[in-house]
Amino acid sequence: MPVPEGTVVVERASAAQDFGPKLNRTAADVVRFLMQHGEMVTATQSLSDDMMELFAAEVGAEIRLVNPGEEQEAELQKLLGVADQDNLNGGEAPLRPPVVTVMGHVDHGKTLLLDRIRNTHVVDGEAGGITQHIGAYQVERNGKPVTFIDTPGHEAFTAMRARGASATDIVVLVVAADDGVMPQTIEAINHARAAEVPIVVAVNKIDRPNADTQRTVAGVAEQGLVPEAWGGENIYCEVSALNGDGIDELLDQMLLMAEVEDLRATPEGRACGVVLESNLDIGRGPIATVLVQRGTLSVGDPMVAGASWGRVRALLNDRGEAVDQAGPSTPVQVLGLSEVSIAGDTFAVAPNEKLAGRVADTREHWQRLSNLGREAHALSGGAKLEDLFTRIQRGETATLNAIIKADVNGSLEAVIESLRKLETSEVRIAVVHRGVGGITENDVQLAYASDATIIGFNVRPDRKAREAADAAKVEIRTYEIIYKLLEDVSSAMVGMLAPDIEEIVTGEAEVRQVFRVPRVGAVAGCYVQNGAITRGAKVRFLREGTIIWKGEITSLKRFTDDVREVQSGYECGIGLSNFQDLKAGDIIETFDEREVARTLEG
Ligand code: GDP
């Protein structure tokens, strides 16, 4: 039978039993063919991109691989009616403020510049007022607003672009006049260019005695950003983030640029835009900072952000004040979503709550499927951190499958970005799953199924997860310093994993109640659930799996007696000398450290 004409759309990680029939072949045809090429797969096992392309070439079919859910996503967008509103955005729509991202080499002054702009140009002139960092803020210059995304650095920018979101209209490239063009300066230029976003160059630190503005400008111009003064198209501003010189001019240039770009968006219709940041607030639930790109977002709106949804319970502006509405180019914090979304997810207000829920659920379903696909695929070629080197030595291309969990979205993205930079032609890092929050039993199951190492940053496994990991021999590595994490992974790559400091959890107690005792401070009434709690033991406090404090136990009591140790099954009072912010439900975990030599398997 001939293969179908034209391009056949195939979902990544399809199994032979689905893939074969799409090309008018049987599952057995596919399996047999792959077997001849040294790949042993069953009819129900997920196939890799290469396998599918190889087979398609063999039978002369043309295929286009799509991620599971990609086709469905277009349908969901239709359901939400996002595209229907495009006509509202025509030439008639009013101008909107430009959205600006600041990039540049580390220490060139991005943070200080963002702070300076914010403190001197807050909307109502209340300089030095509340500076709530929600991921973005808006300032005014001569009555005209400008929105800044205040997570500097190209990591956030790229992470967002990788998810298909474009939030930025203008990039400000900060270059220190006493340092000139540095590696991250060039990276930033490349990222801005790839995104086709215009660049304004801010030559910073001109107050420094060793500042060499001319040389700096020449260096940047060499990268292809030719100044207007030299007949080029790029705007340069000389500024000092320290004393504020040139900042007004910089803002004027951005506004001028915005005019030229003719940035317009309608405040009419249901809002849509992009998630800039998202985290879990213990008291208030999931909070997302979003940038409204079109329409007006109002309290009470049913909205979907990635795979989370809900009715907007409250909106907070960049100064932490409750507002009822937010229009185009306005950053605002949203309360009321069902879960933490991912930076770069798009959001949209749905016609009704039911539809919002349905779209979010469908997305979650597809995400799970695509994780499963990757997981099954990973099964065939993944390696754990410990035996990564053995594979490389055997001359195989090794893939480190990783599940990455972190305390907040920002660090999650940072960890993943940094890991990506360690990739070489020999070692690839496949992120099987990522998420914000403690390490759970689910993560361990997924790690087991996909032969992945779990990497936690500022988070810990709970007891169930730990037990499951022990039973399934899943490797969990937790870090509190990103540098240590990267060092371990790169050491594994060259087969030099240092002796591991193994932590042995010796006891676990749940906080039942916190008392304030005059002159003593806070005392946590606890129930020891596991092991024993010992005075002087190293300890960390966990809230929903996230580390909130580390230190030592200084006082331990049973009733009124000071005791040295309390065994599991008993209640006790734990004195909190330095850390007072415990709540009922928090976990106090004590641990010992001991050095164990690493063994390389294989
Ligand atoms: P980032 O890493 O790019 O965010 O850089 P920071 O904003 O943290 O600045 C790095 C260092 O340079 C800090 O010590 C700042 O105080 C200093 N700095 C930033 N801008 C200026 C400036 O215009 N003049 C001077 N003299 N120092 C600056």
Image: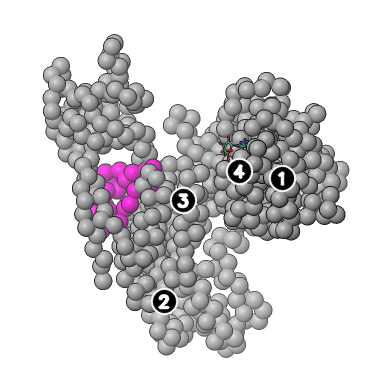
Q: Is residue 296 visible?
A: no
Three-letter code, disc 1? Thr
Between 93 and 397, the residue placed more toward the observer is 397
Residue tagged by mark 2? Answer: 43
Residue tagged by mark 3? Answer: 415
Q: What's the distance in space between the residues labelled 3 and 1, CA to CA?
A: 35 Å
Q: Which residues are magenta?
A: 457-478
Three-letter code, disc 2? Ala
Three-letter code, disc 4? His
Residues tagged 2 and 4 counted as in contact (Cβ below 8 A):
no
Above or below — where is 399 with respect to 275? below
Three-letter code, disc 3? Val
Query: What is the number of the mark on residue 108?
Result: 4
Residues tagged 3 and 4 counted as in contact (Cβ below 8 A):
no
Specify the quarter for ligand 1: top right
Which tag, 2 or 1, sits closer to the chain's start? 2
**Residue 266 position within the rendered picture, expressed as x and y whole percent measured from the top left:** 78, 40
Residue tagged by mark 1? Answer: 213
Horizontal side of residue 513 vs 482, given as left or right: left
Q: Is mark 4 within 8 Å of ligand 1?
A: yes
Q: What's the distance in space between the residues labelled 2 and 1, CA to CA?
A: 65 Å
Q: What's the distance in space between the residues labelled 2 and 3, CA to CA?
A: 36 Å
